[in-house]
Image (tube, rainbow, N blue to C red):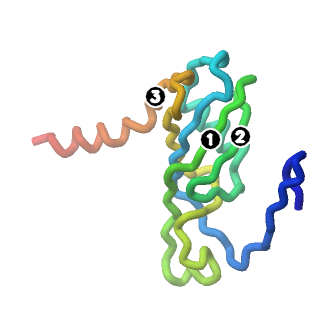
Amino acid sequence: MELSLNGDQVPVQPLTFTPPYLESIDVEIGLFRKTDATEVSADDLTKHFIKIYSGIMFGLGEGFVFEYRGFRYRGSVKGLRVVELAAEQLRGVGGGRDDMGVMMEKTDVTFMKGEGGWLKLKSSAKKYVLPLLKLCTLTKP
């Protein structure tokens, strides 16, 4: 299979197992060009990311490219966590691998700013609500 104009070839083989689903994924992102410096909401970016990549498999260290609001971004998977299933649900799923999984609508996505500093991520309000609520209930007399 050829993937580029240069004629690079990559061997492709079908999976022999059903990949697990992702509970969470940590993605480092950056812009392609310095002139594209922009600020983006992590919450809005997460919704878009899940919409375009739901049902797609990601692996640790995998690189990818996507577009959001007219800007091209490059991404890299820096961390992931697969959904833990009960023993009776594990038959034929994942083959014991935890370095890849399929993105789903419920996957928790965390974006980190990559090298270059041209991208400004507005922090997510949703990511910090639950821990603050837990903290409040723990400190209550």
> Is the residue marked by circle 1 packed among few (<14), some (14-19), or many (20+) residues within 10 Å?
many
Q: Nearer the viewer, mark 2 or mark 3?
A: 2
Quickly name the residue at label 1: 75
Q: Which residue is mark 3?
A: 123
Marks 1 & 2, CB-CB < 8 Å contact: yes
Along the polypeptide, which appears first: circle 1 or circle 2?
Answer: 2
Counting every numbered tag in the picture gives 3
Outermost residue toward the front in this view: 6
Question: Mark 3 or mark 1: which comes first in sequence?
Answer: 1
Q: Secondary structure at mark 2?
A: strand
- The residue at 65%/37% (across/down) is 74
Q: Mark 1 and mark 2: span between their CA atoms? A: 6 Å
| Residue occupying the point 22% across, 38% down | 136
Residue 129, position as x, y percentages in the image: 37, 36
SS for tag 3?
A: loop
For the N terminus, the image quarter is bottom right
Q: Amino acid at mark 2?
A: Val
Frontmost of labels 3 and 1 is 1
Q: Position of residue 139 (x, y in %)?
A: 15, 41
Residue 65 marker: 2
